[in-house]
Amino acid sequence: MKAVIAEIITIGDEILYGQIVDTNSAWMGTELTKIGVRVKQITSISDSEEHIVQALDDAKTRADIIIMTGGLGPTKDDLTKTVLTSYFHTSLQLHEPSLADVTELFKARGKDITELNRQQAFLPEACTPVRNVLGTAPGMWFEQDGKVFVSMPGVPFEMKRMMTDIVLPQLQAYFQTPQIMHKVVQTIGLPESILAERLENWETNLPPHLKLAYLPHLGNVRLRLTGQGTDKEQLEQELQQEVDKLEEIIPNHIFAYGEVKLEEAVGRMLKEKGLTIATAESCTGGFLAHKLTSISGSSAYYQGSVIAYHNEVKTRELHVKPETLQQYGAVSEATVREMAENVRRKFSTSIGVATSGIAGPDGGTSEKPVGTIWIAYADEKQTVAKLLHFNKDRLLNIEYTTMAVLNLVRQSLNATVEE
């Protein structure tokens, strides 16, 4: 079955100036994928007739569906409707149902409809109006040479309602779309390049209708396996079979399936095992505690933290021996081991973890350059410490360190710590 391709065009100088973030395209891409439509390009353009026409001309050469948002307001800089009227060689005509909707909307607000808003009910005669029950600007649906053009307001809640109620069902009815399904496998502990080497044979032998994407972010790599076909159950089975193969190739590096964050996966493990955790943080400054507590229900396993940024706090609150700090320094294996062990005792938790390092950009030495980080994990049976080297900026060093600690907890709970 031939793939149905879509292109999204967002119109508005405010997007190009960075005054607003285009969240519409991401949402539309997700929803179009669900009905078997593949988005191949997203383009942002200015409120300019020349740019709109050029974008339409380009899009129709490569897409079956062209979806536009923005430029449908009542002011002079909103050009989309005027440009589309000219583009499809038609004229504006009052659409009485749209006028009734706009009039009722103003009435509900206790106001009289303005002339500018009345003009929004004038639509290109060649279009099929797309009702907007939440705003004053109707959408427009055009068909030409087997292609569909849809124009909607840029206001997110208006666009989403129109897409959900009208546009998506009509696209499904107009096009015979294949099933598109995704399986997401969350991995950590292997850089993208090494992970690709490990998976080369498996990836090479994937069926032609299954595609793999590597999506790296802050030390973990999301593997997105996408399948396309006509039989939903068969496609689901094929995708799961490939995921099962992944479990045999990289078992110790998979921490979750689907859109699950590492801190959420670790939280689930702690809750399932009935364990509690406390953190002793120096270089991460509480970011690790923030990650752990960002998960709903974390009070079941998270007890508390000591932000021991200064050495005096390490000795006073965590009872790190002064001689340890004097002999080895704050950024050392000996120090983080004591921090992890002692924070566990302080809070009477199952697990204690600790961080100490040089986040930068200052503070580095020839022996301990910026990005030198020690982390530790302690429970009643063992204490494990790891030396990390991150050549990043300050905030990235903090984030990467936090991910490394969460992964150390995961590995330790799985009894798969890699020394």
Image (cartoon, grey):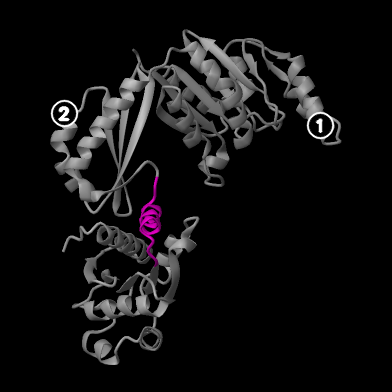
Mark 1 or mark 2, earlier in chain: 1
Q: Is residue 134 above or below residue 323?
A: above
What's the CA distance linking mark 1 and mark 2?
Answer: 60 Å
Q: Residue 351: x and y, percent?
A: 34, 69
Q: Residue at x 47, y 19 (%)?
A: 65
Query: Measured along the vertical axis of the image, is residue 18 above or below residue 304?
Result: above
Instruction: Specify whether residue 267 is painted magenta.
Output: yes
Assign the N terminus to one quadrant of the image.
top left
Where does label 1 land, which residue? Answer: 106
Q: Is residue 398 left or right of residue 25?
A: left
Image point 45% across, 70% down: which residue? Answer: 303
Asked if disc 1 and disc 2 are in contact, CB closer than 8 Å, the reply is no
Observer able to see residue 206 = yes
Quickly name the residue at label 2: 205
Quadrant of the rendered structure where residue 348 is?
A: bottom left
384 or 142: nearer the viewer: 384
* Residue type of the residue flagged with mark 2: Asn
Asked if residue 153 can be seen in this view, the reply is: no
User: Three-letter amino acid code at disc 1?
Assistant: Phe
Q: Which residues are magenta?
A: 260-276
